[in-house]
Amino acid sequence: MANSPQAKKRARQNEKRFAVNKARRSRIRTFLRKAEEAIASGDKDAAAEAVRAAQPELMRGVTKGVYHKNTASRKISRLTARVKALG
């Protein structure tokens, strides 16, 4: 348990940051799930649109420190490849 004022403050800050990051991760996962579902449906136009919508969300997660740059790039790359394969 935090005893010093500084440790108490850090604990409060960590809770806030955790909540913000959790919401961001959830939002990104929603976009990814929509892209996955669009790809699974077989509709190339809808899938391409869903991936285009997911891309900036993923990269925003990178700039906010939720995801590593390479992780986001890998996810985007794999989604794009799957959309391309639909054609």
Image: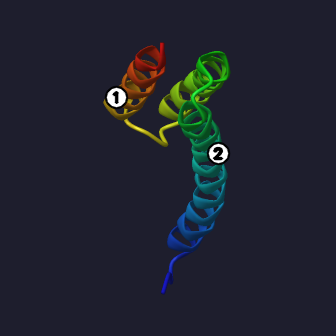
* CA gap, disc 2 and disc 1: 17 Å
Residue at (50, 84) in percent of width and height: 3
Q: Amino acid at mark 2?
A: Thr
Q: Eyeballing the image, is 38 above or below 29? A: above
Q: Position of residue 73 (x, y in %)?
A: 38, 24
Choose top left, top right, bottom left or bottom right for residue 48.
top right
In the image, which disc is placed on residue 30? Answer: 2
Query: What residue is drawn where x is 60% and y is 56%?
Result: 22
Q: List x then y, in percent, for residue 35.
A: 59, 33
Quarter residue 84 falls in:
top left
Residue at (37, 27) in percent of width and height = 78
- What mark, if any, has residue 74 been given in the picture? 1
Task: State which quadrant residue 72 falls in.
Answer: top left
Q: Nearer the viewer, residue 42 or 66?
A: 42
Packing grade of label 1 (10 A; few <14, some 14-19, many >=20) is: few
Q: On the rendered structure, is 29 left or right of 84?
A: right
What secondary structure is found at the residue carrying circle 2?
Answer: helix
The disc, 2 or 1, on the residue closer to the chain's N-terminal end is: 2
Find residue 39 and report its horizontal and vertical position in percent.
Answer: 54, 31
Q: Nearer the viewer, residue 6 or 37?
A: 37
Q: Is residue 28 above or below residue 42?
A: below
Q: Nearer the viewer, residue 37 or 57?
A: 37
Please give the count of numbered marks on the rendered protein.
2
Tag 1, which secondary structure? helix
The vertical placement of 79 against 52, above or below, is: below
Q: Amino acid at mark 1?
A: Arg
Q: Nearer the viewer, residue 4 or 35?
A: 35
Residue found 55% across the figure and 70% down from its top? 11
